[in-house]
Image: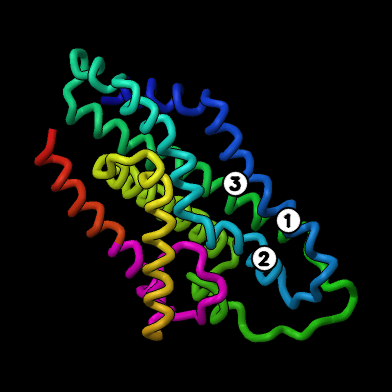
Amino acid sequence: MIHHLLDELRASIRRPQFVVVAALIVIVPPVSGVASLSGYALDHWMSYATIMFDGLGLLFPLLVTLLTQPRLLDEWSNTYANSVRTRVAPAQYFRTKLASSAILAGAVFLTATALALLVARLTYTDHGYGVASAGPIETRFPLSQLWALSPALYVIAFCLWVGLVAASVGIWCTLLTALVSNRFVALVAPLVLWTAVQFGLAVIGLEELSLPPVRCHVSQQTLWTECVGLLAITVDSAAMLSIVRKSD
């Protein structure tokens, strides 16, 4: 399993498509934040960081899909997977795909989050206006109750949280791809389903239970509410995995 996983990771990160998407995810948020800073008079560097996360939060499932699924779709469309069956058991092959999707998505989004926070902290300025704080940081952002214990702890926890959610969504996207026969639908379905859930929760007034990880414009709730969306993704993934196991 480890040998096949390492081969899978090496093959994935060598693909130009993966390199381009990963670079855009890591580089664009901090660059866009720095470029737009002149138009804001912000009260804290974390408020500045939320500007960088806006695009990531909006396109999160699509970005995970573009990172993890194109190679899988190429293999399944050109019968590569059929030739692998003579050397690797189908169950092991699929487990390797799930693990590689989780690792790639988690690593890229953890790196992107850490870099955005670092750039926000180093380049933040209120342009000399002395903008008053809108409220305690501990009540303003996802997981920010940890800020009262230590700002460094909050930053570390938030980066790990984004990486964990990205990994879980990578698994979810791979399972969805396994159940969808149309290549185009497999690529856009995660974004469509994600957006539909977010919109539905907003309509019924349950924004605080919206899907993680980047929910910077949702009023802060207790820490446990952050886990509700991840639990829903996990349950949905378990259900799809059960269906995949029953198929060939």
**Tag 1: residue type?**
Ser
State yes or no: discs 2 and 1 in contact (Cβ < 8 Å). Answer: yes
Q: Quadrant of the N terminus?
A: top left
What residue is pinned by disc 1? 32
The residue depicted at 45 percent of the width and 58 percent of the height is 161
Residue furthest out toward the left: 246
Q: Secondary structure at mark 3?
A: helix
Give amino acid for label 2.
Answer: Ile
Query: What range of the chain is rendered magenta?
Result: 206-232
Left or right position of 60 against 193: right
Q: Residues within 10 Å of mark 3 (few under 14, many from 20)?
A: many
Secondary structure type for disc 1: helix
Residue pictured at 85% horizontal, 66% vertical: 38
Residue 151 locus on image (x, y percent) = 59, 66
Residue closer to the observer: 118 or 248? 248
Q: How many numbered callouts?
A: 3
Q: Which mark is residue 51?
A: 2
State the residue position of label 3.
25
Residue 244's image quarter? Answer: top left
